[in-house]
Image (tube, rainbow, N blue to C red):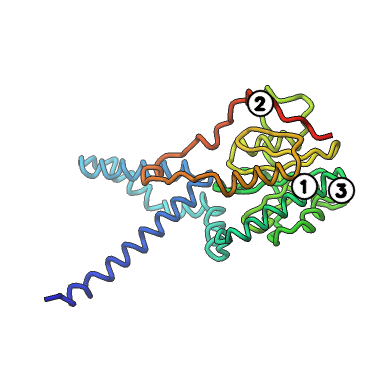
Amino acid sequence: MFDWDLVEQLWRPVLEIAILSVAIYWILMFVRRTRGWPVVLGFLALLGLFAVSSVLELVVLSVLLRLFFSFSAIAILILFQQEIRRMLATIGSFSNLTSVRERRENLETIVQTADRLADVKIGALIAIEQSVDLDQVVESGVEVECEATSEMLETIFFPNNAIHDGGVIIRGDRIAQAACIFPLSRRKDLNKSLGTRHRAAIGLSEETDAVVVAVSEETGMISHAYRGQLVRGISPDELRSFLTSVLFSEPRPRRSWLSWLTRERRSNKPALPSLSTPKPQRP
């Protein structure tokens, strides 16, 4: 006979364990995208050391670690104040839950903006955020938080606008920040004719998995940078095809539980210079 009393005793602990498991997984995945991840790894290492010292009855070490962990809550609030604020904002907005149709509309917005700005030779630098949080990489920036439209992007990059210098961060279907300073590439093999805008595009793509679209102010040339590779002189159709292949068609590897404890540096490692023949530049 089925024991309902046992079910009533078990369903609450099982539900609680499931909720905690999901919460811990989500928090680890969120923090892993930030620069605070090495601190988390160090904290986990100290936890492991504390467990070992307790098992081996290392009294002095256990007391010192216990004193350290007694102040860990305050240390976490100080070290991860930006990450905590960002995490709470993400929970409140659910900005990542956009449909495929909305993301494709956003892609078309970026392509149309690049095409229009290229025709009138207005410089632009647009970074499309993926899995790596760009707030931890860029310097300065002005909070915008508005819907990503061609009109808004063109207004931002208009030369007389106060925030036209720097780059724009696209997060989901929204413009997150403008006037951002992206890290410049330090590679020595780059063409000497590349300006600051294109070096910033390469530099950001080297440190993150973002896709960066750049429009040259001098030539009106459209370029894209991804994983440290810059391709110049592309047409709007080529840009659309590339963005589609990266943002929609590229398979995402499944992460195992072991990946929680290691940082995948492959995506952030600068790619080797391409040996293929460069594409002809658009006049």
Which residue carries the number 2 mark?
Answer: 187
User: For the residue marked with disc 3, what is the amino acid?
Assistant: Pro
Q: Which mark is residue 114?
A: 1
Circle 3: element type = loop
Q: Quadrant of residue 95?
A: bottom right
| 68 left or right of 130 in image | left
Residue 146 horizontal/vertical position (percent): 70, 61
User: For the residue marked with disc 2, what is the amino acid?
Assistant: Arg
In percent of the image, x 67 and y 37: which residue is there? 225
The reply to whether discs 1 and 3 touch (Cβ–Cβ < 8 Å) is: no
Q: Quadrant of residue 10?
A: bottom left
| 172 left or right of 281 in image | left
- Mark 2: give few (<14), some (14-19) or many (20+) Cα within 10 Å: few
Quarter of the figure with the N terminus:
bottom left
In percent of the image, x 75 and y 48: which residue is there? 179
| 168 left or right of 24 in image | right
Which is nearer the eye, 224 or 23? 224
Residue 192 horizontal/vertical position (percent): 77, 24
Does 19 appear above or below 235?
below
Tell which tag, 1 or 3, sits nearer the viewer.
Answer: 1
User: For the residue marked with disc 1, what is the amino acid?
Assistant: Ala
Q: Earlier in the sequence, mark 2 or mark 1?
A: 1
Residue 127 horizontal/vertical position (percent): 67, 46
- Mark 3: give few (<14), some (14-19) or many (20+) Cα within 10 Å: few
In percent of the image, x 31 and y 67: which residue is there? 15
Q: Earlier in the sequence, mark 1 or mark 3?
A: 1
Mark 1–mark 3 Cα distance, whole angstroms, equals 15 Å
The reply to whether discs 3 and 2 touch (Cβ–Cβ < 8 Å) is: no
Circle 1: element type = helix
Which residue carries the number 3 mark?
Answer: 159
| 226 left or right of 62 in image | right
